[in-house]
Amino acid sequence: MLRAVASVDVLRELDDRRFELTPLGHLIRNVVEGSIAGWAAYVGRPYYWAAWGELLHSVRTGANAFHHVNGTDVWTYRSMRPDENAIFDCAMT
């Protein structure tokens, strides 16, 4: 897993088989200026991935993939789930 993350330049493997954060990896920490931690948390949410996983449905039918998967639009979905809405707000900040 660590090597997979290193392959996208979030970690770097050291000669002694330890890993360290790269400059990009540091941006995922929520305590640094310019952090993208909120965005990373948001795009990792299951409901977000599920909708993107149905992109082909949208291409084939013209219908909204998010609505197809979740039975409602994204704004209504999050309005009924304050925890998800807070994660979204943090990502947008």
Image: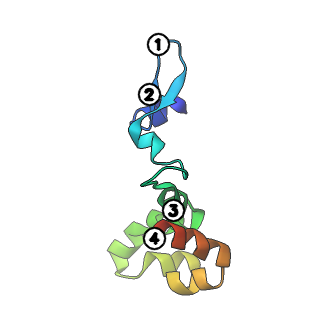
List the residue tagged with mark 2. 12
Amino acid of disc 2: Arg
Residue 70 appears in the picture as rendered: yes
- Mark 1 crowdedness (10 Å alpha carbons): few <14, some 14-19, many ≥20: few
Q: CA gap, disc 1 to disc 4? A: 38 Å
Q: Looking at the picture, tell me which residue is in the foreground, 52 or 45.
A: 45
* Residue 15: numbered disc: 1
Return the x and y of residue 33 as percentages of the image width and height.
Answer: 45, 53
Amino acid of disc 1: Asp
* Residue 49: numbered disc: 3
Answer with mark 2 or mark 3, whichever residue precedes in sequence: 2
In this picture, residue 25 sits left or right of residue 59: right
In this picture, residue 69 sits left or right of residue 24: right
State which quadrant residue 61 falls in.
Answer: bottom left
Q: Looking at the picture, tell me which residue is in the foreground, 82 or 61.
A: 82
At x 49% / y 69%, what residue is drawn?
51
Residue 71 appears in the picture as rendered: no
